[in-house]
Image (cartoon, grey):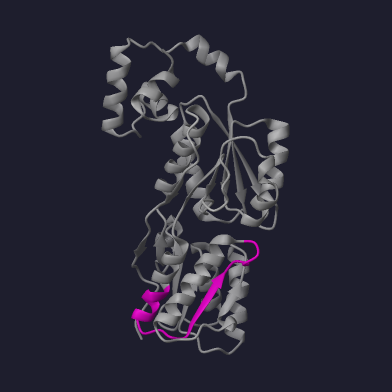
Amino acid sequence: MTIVDIAKEAGYSVSTVSRVLNGRRDVSEEARDRIMRIVEAYQFVPNNNAKHLKQTVSQSILILVKGTSNMLFTNIIEVIQDTIEGSDYSLRVHYLDEDADEVKEAVRMCREHKPMGILFLGGNIQYFHEEFELVNVPCVLVTDRADKLGFRNLASVSTDDMAAAEMAVDYLFDHGHRDIAVIGGDMALSSPSKYRKVGAKRSFIKHGCEFEEESYAVARFSYESAYNAMNRMLASQRSITAVFAMSDVMAVGAMRAIFDAGLRVPEDISVIGFDGTLLADYYNPKIVTVCQGYEKIARKSIDLLFGMIDLNKPATHELVPFSLKNTESVSSI
């Protein structure tokens, strides 16, 4: 009996079985008990020679990361690294510019490095339409939805961005704000930004307000770009009392611009972010933010990928619940 046989019989991924056999703590008691019952029933003994031989062959998982300033992706990568530690797999993390074609890069990396699977952190759906059929390994699109693409080797784990953004803007309306600006990504490059903008618009309509395009400032998911976008908003002389930023990094950039203009958060302008990263907890003031549950996203993504690689499971598409963390950066008017 092999570790793959144990995984099949237990109904868990090979990575989970590996963590149990290596005495890792990041496994549920239910999974540990079931796996160990099977191990004891078959008197399974890990073959260290076979394991060593397997490790001499390429067993890498490629992570393609869009952008270098996204704190959510940083948190997700840390959880993934911790999750696969002790397994037979290694990680190769490759960063791309926000404007880059991640699918074209995946095709090249598959040809040159032959990874066992790929995790896409961020992506442009248009690129998947154009060239993803050339990628021949199991893949997971992380923080974006791939259910409508129809590829058998492309799973996805994401948040309902539309509903989450609507909830964030509802929160601002509920605190009396009506002059609300939105800072988000380029619609042509970022599918989550497109969904979040639709969600924001739905909140405006629900509260009897018209969403004007002048209220939307395009920025990259970086401090500097959001800082500049907020400065443009302030220079436009619009009467802004609140800002919805489509990431915590953008929220921090916007808040810095507000402070540098001699204004206060939240006394003069309230700010709400998106992602629920640790950054939001340690900035001053603490940022009200939509929490995506990055730990669950990370673990679900790697479980789906290992299931496709080791057990030949079909691609599935998961939505991870979100919540709103109420802290200090929004006040009522």
Q: Is residue 8 left or right of residue 137?
A: left
Residue 304 x %, y %: 46, 38
In the rendered image, the vertical position of residue 73 relative to residue 49, given as above or below: below
Q: Is residue 80 left or right of residue 10?
A: right
Q: Is residue 321 left or right of residue 93?
A: left
Residue 283 x %, y %: 44, 64
**In the depicted view, which residue is nearer to us: 127 or 313?**
313
In the rendered image, the vertical position of residue 151 relative to residue 326, given as above or below: above
Residue at 42% over, 74% down:
169
Q: Quadrant of residue 203?
A: bottom left
Q: Quadrant of residue 64?
A: top right
Residue at 47% over, 62% down:
161
**Residue 265 visible in the shown view:** no
The stretch drawn in magenta includes residue 47: no
What's the magenta region? Answer: 169-189
Q: Quadrant of residue 228?
A: bottom right
In the rendered image, the vertical position of residue 50 relative to residue 300, given as above or below: above
**Residue 322 visible in the shown view:** yes
**In the depicted view, which residue is nearer to us: 163 or 94?**
163
